[in-house]
Amino acid sequence: MILFGNILQQLRNEKAWSQDYLAKHLGVSKSQVANYEAGRRFPSLEILILASRVFGVSTDYLLGLDSTKGNFIDVSELSSEEIKSIHSVIDCLIAAHKTQG
């Protein structure tokens, strides 16, 4: 299993972000990000969830439990009706791809 720190560093590097830049987005210090990446510290659940939103990946991916980066969309700010609409659009797109294939 890949360590959280390695995954965090890889995602940060893919975006060409400094540790300081990521720290500001997570609301922690630069040294805290360095400690996460070095495996000396592990983030709180709140920071883990925030990091998943910042990078657009699941918490399972960050934890090394899922090797598929996938696409993650944060819908926590949307109403249940808005979320249902998004699901409907996704279902239509999947059905359209099935008929084309």
Image (spheres, helix red, strand yellow):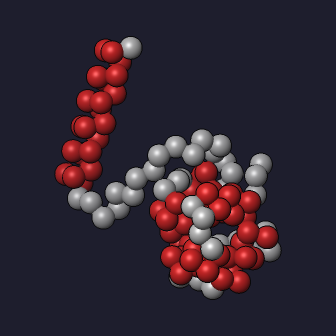
Left or right position of 100 against 61: left
Q: Position of residue 41 (x, y in %)?
A: 75, 75
Can residue 52 be seen by looking at this rendering? no
Q: Hey, which quadrant is residue 99 in on the image? A: top left
Q: Is residue 32 left or right of residue 79?
A: right
Residue at 30%, 30% in the rendered image: 93
Number of numbered discs on residues: 0
Q: Give the residue drawn at x 73%, y 76%.
A: 34
84 sits to left or right of 58: left
Q: Seen from this angle, which residue lies furthest front? A: 16
* Residue in front for this viewpoint, 93 or 81: 93
Residue drawn at (60%, 41%) of the image: 68
Rendered-image quadrant of the C terminus = top left
Front residue of this view, candidates 58 and 23: 23
Q: Position of residue 40 (x, y in %)?
A: 80, 74
Q: Residue at x 52, y 60 (%)?
A: 55
Q: Is residue 99 left or right of residue 18?
A: left
Is residue 35 in view from this perspective?
Answer: yes
What is the x, y in percent for residue 28?
Answer: 59, 83
Q: Position of residue 24 (x, y in %)?
A: 53, 81
